[in-house]
Image (cartoon, rainbow, N blue to C red):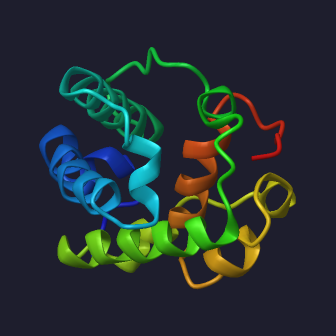
Amino acid sequence: MTDQSTSLYARLGGYDAITAVVENLLPRLVNDAQLGRFWQNRGSDGMRREKQLLVDFLCASAGGPLYYTGRDMALSHKGMKISGSDWTTFIRHLNATLDAFKVPRQERDQVSFHRKYQGRYCRGLENTTRKLGPAARSLITGVILGSQNKEAIRC
């Protein structure tokens, strides 16, 4: 039984566990035939920075002691032309990563998802996120829209 008063960050295993998830997920995305285009022109230094920013963002979003210093997610993803098919592929990799780490359903479902932003950001997002628990959907929305900025923009 999980103590609900314990932060999601602590229940997930803290910094090291979240870093391990990012280290599993990013290579899946970068090496994917469809999604790899988003990292096509990134150097190794830029990739290390991006990975650290993602770790910081996820740790801070899960209630950890880190402070995210990157740009908001709406600005970071503006103009990338993320399609519904891209989302489907991303979610497949995300689920595979969460499954590999045996993330419990309770943790996947903890955070509520703001459906009103879901379909406005990328076409196909609602259909592709339906298979996830609310926490995973919220995480995706948080990553794209940012935890502070809930105004959707077009991909």
139 displayed left or right of 27: right
Please tell me whether residue 138 is drawn above or below residue 155 in the rendered image: below
Q: For this rendering, which residue is in front, 144 or 58?
A: 144
Q: Is residue 55 visible?
A: yes
Furthest-top residue in this view: 69
Q: Residue at x 45, y 50 (%)?
A: 37
Q: Residue at x 75, y 72 (%)?
A: 124
Residue 60 location in percent, x, y?
41, 32
Furthest-bottom residue in this view: 131
Please tell me whether residue 130 is drawn above or below residue 15 in the rendered image: below
92 displayed left or right of 109: left
Quadrant in the picture for residue 103: bottom left
Q: Is residue 134 visible?
A: no
Number of numbered tags placed on the structure image: 0
Q: For this rendering, which residue is in front, 102 or 37?
A: 37
Residue 77 location in percent, x, y?
62, 37
Q: Residue at x 26, y 49 (%)?
A: 22
Q: Residue at x 43, y 21 (%)?
A: 68
Residue 29 location in percent, x, y?
35, 58
Please tell me whether residue 88 is drawn above or below residue 44 in the rendered image: below
Quadrant in the picture for residue 50: top left
Q: Quadrant of the N terminus?
A: bottom left
